[in-house]
Image (cartoon, grey):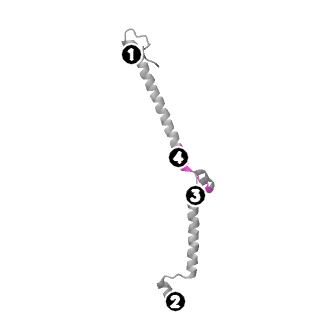
Amino acid sequence: MDLSLRFFTGRRSPRRTMMTELDSEKDEELLKEDLKYYFMNPCEKYRARFQIPWKLGLQILKIVMVTTQLVLFGLSNQLVVSFKEDNTVAFKHLFLKGYSGVEIGRAH
């Protein structure tokens, strides 16, 4: 009858309670360790678990790619601007009678 009372009243045996407390303490320690790892910077994570911070490497690769694209775009734009200026001067020499190459009233 004692066994059925424990089962129906929801009381746990002392041994079961101790094991549950041990499990909850173990789970709490694991959770603390995971949270500690979560808030580490990449260098600390590498020192803790010796895993290569591939996400950091990916971010650096993206920065290098975007910088390269900007430099190439700038160089391309510079070539277009200098080509346009050279063509403008050439057309002025061809089509404007008496053009000397000096524009009056324009400051550089």
The image quarter containing residue 27 is bottom right
Seen as rendered, the residue at the extreme top is 98
Q: Is residue 54 magenta?
A: yes
Task: Tell me: 19 left or right of 89.
Answer: right
**Residue visible at 36% across and 13% down in the picture:** 95
Q: Which residue in the protein does label 2 denote?
A: 2
Q: Which label lies toward us, 1 or 2?
A: 2
**Residue 39: percent from left, percent from top:** 56, 56
**Residue visible at 58% across and 59% down in the picture:** 36
In this rendering, is residue 18 above or below 103?
A: below
Tell me the number on the disc at residue 75: none
Task: Tell me: 94 left or right of 45.
Answer: left
Q: Amino acid at mark 4?
A: Leu
Mark 1 to mark 2 CA distance (whole Å): 109 Å
Few, some or many residues within 10 Å of mark 4 (<14, 14–19, 20+): few
In this rendering, is residue 7 above or below 68?
A: below
Q: Answer with mark 4 or mark 1, whichever residue precedes in sequence.
A: 4
**Residue visible at 59% across and 66% down in the picture:** 29
Few, some or many residues within 10 Å of mark 1 (<14, 14–19, 20+): few
Q: Return the residue nearer the eye: 72 or 27.
A: 27
Q: Which residue in the protein does label 4 denote?
A: 58
Q: Which residue in the protein does label 3 denote?
A: 37
Q: Secondary structure at mark 4?
A: helix
Q: Answer with mark 2 or mark 3, whichever residue precedes in sequence.
A: 2
Q: Which residues are magenta?
A: 48-60
Tell me the number on the disc at residue 91: 1
**Residue visible at 46% across and 26% down in the picture:** 79
Q: Secondary structure at mark 3?
A: helix
